[in-house]
Image (cartoon, helix red, strand yellow):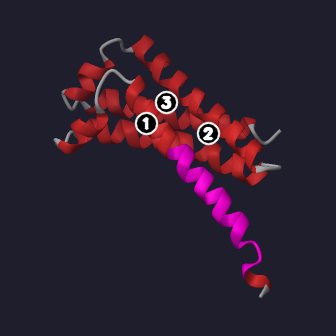
């Protein structure tokens, strides 16, 4: 069956993407000054919005990395670049809003939307830069 001939490669790249996404979530939640998962468990919408935007901002360039990768190692390297870019976006937003984490903990949506939008914008630009 030629229709599933690419299944092993599909599973390899999907597994790589899942692993990188898990790594991203672990690193990102450690890098932030607030505990997103604990806040989300308490139904703090601002934490969900900011983390969701960040996750999308990571997934976009990761998808481009998978699409353009010459190998799984290539995908891993560019996935790690996407991770670093998203952490940098968080810290840049913290420069603009030093009390960002307090605002998110207080469920103040303006700060969460700014962080999520900045993460998404960073991801879009990162993804576009990977299409050289």
- Mark closer to the chain start, 2 or 3: 3
Cα separation between marks 1 and 3? 20 Å
Cα separation between marks 2 and 3? 10 Å
Q: Which residue is mark 3?
A: 118
Q: Which residue is mark 1?
A: 26
Q: Label 3 near label 1: C-beta < 8 Å?
A: no
Residue 36 in magenta? no
Query: Mark number for residue 124?
Result: 2
Q: Residue at x 59, y 37 (%)?
A: 123
**Side of 48 relative to 91 (left or right):** left
- Mark closer to the chain start, 1 or 2: 1
Disc 3: CA contacts within 10 A as few (<14), some (14-19) or many (>=20): many
Q: Residue at x 67, y 59 (%)?
A: 12
Q: Residue 128, percent across and down? A: 71, 39
* Part of the protein shown in magenta: 4-21
Q: Nearer the viewer, mark 1 or mark 2?
A: 1
């Amino acid at each position: 069956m030629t229709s599933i001939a690419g299944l092993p490669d599909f599973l390899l790249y999907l597994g790589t993407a899942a692993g990188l996404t898990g790594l991203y979530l672990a690193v990102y939640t450690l890098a932030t000054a607030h505990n997103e998962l604990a806040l989300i468990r308490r139904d703090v919408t601002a934490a969900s919005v900011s983390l969701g935007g960040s996750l999308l901002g990571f997934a976009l360039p990761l998808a481009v990395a998978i699409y353009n990768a010459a190998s799984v190692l290539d995908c891993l390297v560019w996935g790690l670049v996407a991770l670093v870019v998203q952490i940098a976006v968080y810290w840049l937003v913290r420069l603009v809003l030093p009390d960002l984490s307090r605002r998110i903990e207080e469920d103040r949506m303006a700060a969460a939307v700014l962080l999520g939008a900045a993460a998404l914008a960073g991801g879009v630009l990162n993804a576009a830069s990977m299409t050289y």
